[in-house]
Amino acid sequence: MSKGRHASEEALAGQLEPRADLRTREARERLARLVTQLFVHWRLSTTEQAALLGLSPENRSTLSRYRKGEPLADSRDLLDRAGHLLGIHKSLRILFPEDRDLAYRWMTTPNRRLARRPVDLVIERGFEGLLALRRYLDFERGT
């Protein structure tokens, strides 16, 4: 493990194997761990976490199960959202390689170009907001 990095950061850095079969319980368990670790690093409220996963704000029990190691539901929408969240994380790591704190604060820091906090864009626009955020970061990376 690199100096100053936590085990959860190492796990996020490695993410899932590129061709992981998300139909398997094991892959969805790993994805649930990665996403919930990411939410901790991003310091998101439970309501924000639920919104990013497309869950109702009252659905705290599902988030709690994911934090305890239950696999993500075998839902195309949920798995796509999780994939985009990890893609956003990867883009932020590339954009801010020397400033991990900035990469983790980015989702909850007001952004002039977006006219709001990035997490609010996703909360307001749902899946389309998640895609817009991913495209925005891809553009910023020059990809």
Image (tube, rainbow, N blue to C red):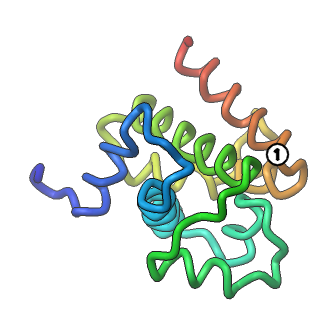
Could you say which quadrant of the image residue 19 lies in?
top left
The residue sitting at 22% across, 62% down in the picture is 7
Q: Nearer the viewer, residue 140 or 63?
A: 63
Q: Residue at x 66, y 33 (%)?
A: 134
* Circle 1 residues within 10 Å: few <14, some 14–19, many ≥20: many
Which image quarter: residue 26?
bottom left
Please state which amino acid type lies under the numbered disc 1.
Answer: Phe
Viewer-proximal residue, 69 or 106?
69
Give the percent coordinates (x, y) of residue 135: 70, 26
What is the count of numbered marks?
1
- The answer to whether residue 114 is seen in the rendering is yes
Question: Could you tell me residue 137's position as x and y percent?
Answer: 61, 29
Whether 121 is drawn above or below 71: the answer is above
Q: Is residue 16 left or right of residue 58?
A: left
In the image, is 120 to the left or to the right of 31? right
Name the quarter where the C terminus is drawn: top right
74 vs 104, nearest the viewer: 74
Q: Is residue 41 visible?
A: no
The residue located at (45%, 30%) in the rendering is 95
Q: Which residue in the protein does label 1 denote?
A: 127
Residue at the (63%, 77%) spot, across then down: 63
Helix, strand or loop under label 1: helix
**Most foreground residue, 59 or 119:** 59
